[in-house]
Image (tube, rainbow, N blue to C red):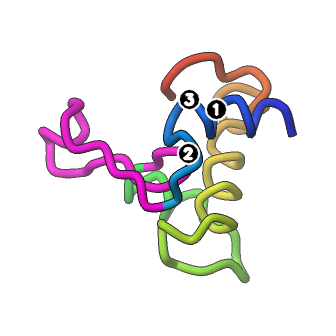
Amino acid sequence: YEGIKKNLMRESAGNPRAINDWDVNAVNGVPSKGLLQVIDPTFKAYHVEGTSWDIYDPVANITAACNYAADKYGSMDNVNSAY
């Protein structure tokens, strides 16, 4: 929980409709979106069956981001910067 909360507050300040329109992903046409600032291809790859396909849906965004973090970093608790 603490890793999710820490990253959520850093990435979106708790705004489920947050969108990053300035970083390299945005420049490349795939802006980061939602509570944990997930890009569309990552969301699709790590989506959890039974959750919404809306990247702005808090549950869907968090679960996809946590799956990604677990795959790449072992846990959301190990993410200490933008991922």
* Disc with the residue nearer the chain's start (2 vs 3): 3
Q: Position of residue 30 (x, y in %)?
A: 25, 51
Callout 1 touching callout 3 (CB < 8 Å): yes
Point out which mark residue 7 bears: 1
- Residue identifier under label 2: 36
Q: Nearer the viewer, residue 39 or 74?
A: 39
The residue type indicated by label 1 comes to: Asn
Give the main secondary structure, helix, strand or loop, of the magenta stretch. Answer: loop
Q: Residues within 10 Å of mark 3 (few under 14, many from 20)?
A: some
The residue type indicated by label 3 comes to: Arg
The residue type indicated by label 2 comes to: Leu
* SS label for mark 1: helix
Query: What residue appears at the point 55 percent right and 18 percent down from the top-left corner?
Result: 81
Q: Nearer the viewer, residue 55 or 45?
A: 55
Q: Residues within 10 Å of mark 1 (few under 14, many from 20)?
A: many
The magenta stretch is 17-38
The quarter of the rendered structure image containing the N terminus is top right
- Establish if 15 lies above or below 48: above
Q: Nearer the viewer, residue 20 or 25?
A: 20
Q: Is residue 32 magenta?
A: yes
Q: Is residue 45 left or right of residue 26?
A: right
